[in-house]
Amino acid sequence: MTLVLGIESSCDETAVALVTADRRVLAERIASQEEEHRPFGGVVPELAARAHAERLAPMVEAVLADAGVTLADVDAIAATSGPGLIGGVMVGLVTGKALAFATGKPLWGVNHLEGHALSPRLIAPDLQFPYLLLLVSGGHCQLIAVDGVDRYRRLATTIDDAAGEAFDKVAKMLGLGFPGGPAVERAARAGNPRAVPLPRPLVGSGEPHFSFAGLKTAVLRAVQSGKYETADVAASFQAAVTDCLADRTRLALQAMPEATALVVAGGVAANGAVRAALEALAGKYGLPFIAPPQRLCTDNAAMIGWAAQERIAAGFAPEPDPQARPRWPLDPNAEPARGAGVKA
Ligand code: KG4
Ligand code: ZN
């Protein structure tokens, strides 16, 4: 049974996991850097890289010990090699290279987005290609047709901010702290989602993409007006984002009649309102809805190890000397979306 040691360090989570080819996570550790970054209200790349460097080696040892195995039992090493904050990616990738060099095992440089894209198959053995994936995180907001391993078609992306980025900025405006998404969701529970009139950018439009900049500005104006309760702003914002995500996903489902399932991944997929709306949408199209559990939605190493397992099973060979890449689109053929500030 092939055993892969996965390493993730592309943002502010340091993570290590041992994943088998038959979908077992033998051991897994995730160290969040929330405490380091909280005083700055966002992730500081230099601090992130330093924290990864301090934590990674002891975490590898701890995960091996947790599973009761040694490096000799591991068949391959998999490390995120992009996209992400370059300092952190380098720390994880170099650690992976050192382990591979010392043990003579192959190293897989994994695309972090492929990790998210394939993560649902780790928990849903029956999930077949092709499926429609909504990837919503702090850095990305994309709809991707997942036709197979390494066969990705980007159907939509954001023309300005990612959805998670909007959650984080709104949390800051409301003084809810960092990280923003979970804080906004908590505050929204006590609020009225119809209290604050907010726009739903691009909803109803035939253009497939997302946009959140105008919504963010409208929230700022609502906050500055002093007319609304924090909980009501949070609930109204969350409802607006949810409507945007569901409407754009509906458009993509229409463009992909061959989809066998609707799948959501990435940090924002942890949001209950977003999940509920997508589940209802999938139901309307008679499709199963698959959302990984929260620990697999936010950044983790199990998905990195699993992506390598998928590549091994599909007969791929590892790239000889993977380099750290700050940008690495899943679909290199995707047309640039309109406007400036396009995210990969
Ligand atoms: O996938 P992820 O852990 O890191 C990236 O690759 O970006 O996603 C992190 C993002 C952050 O913007 C965070 O605020 C958002 O996911 N997030 C949430 C929730 N939990 C995390 N957004 C909305 N509701 C949540 N419960
Ligand atoms: Zn991520």
Image (cartoon, grey):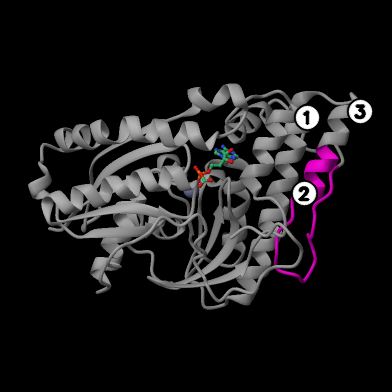
Reply yes or no: does residue 215 show up in magenta: yes
Q: Is residue 106 visible?
A: yes
Q: Position of residue 20 (x, y in %)?
A: 20, 53
- Do callouts 2 and 3 mark residues in contact (Cβ within 8 Å)? no
Q: Amino acid at mark 3?
A: Ser
Q: Position of residue 244 (x, y in %)?
A: 72, 54
The segment highlighted magenta reads 198-219
Residue at x 74% of width, y 55% of height: 211
Q: Which element type, helix, strand or loop, lies under badge 3?
A: helix
Q: Is residue 195 visible?
A: no
Instruction: Give the mark nearest the N terminus, 2 or 3.
Output: 2
Q: CA distance from mark 1 to mark 2?
A: 20 Å
Residue at x 49% of width, y 35% of height: 46
Q: CA distance from mark 3 to mark 1?
A: 13 Å
Q: Which residue is mark 3?
A: 225
Q: Which mark is residue 232?
A: 1
Q: Nearer the viewer, mark 3 or mark 1?
A: 3
Vertical position of residue 54 compared to residue 293: above or below: above
Residue at x 71% of width, y 59% of height: 210
Front residue of 234/302: it is 302
227 relative position to 149: left or right: right
Instruction: Give the mark nearest the N terminus, 3 or 1.
Output: 3
Q: Which element type, helix, strand or loop, lies under badge 2?
A: helix
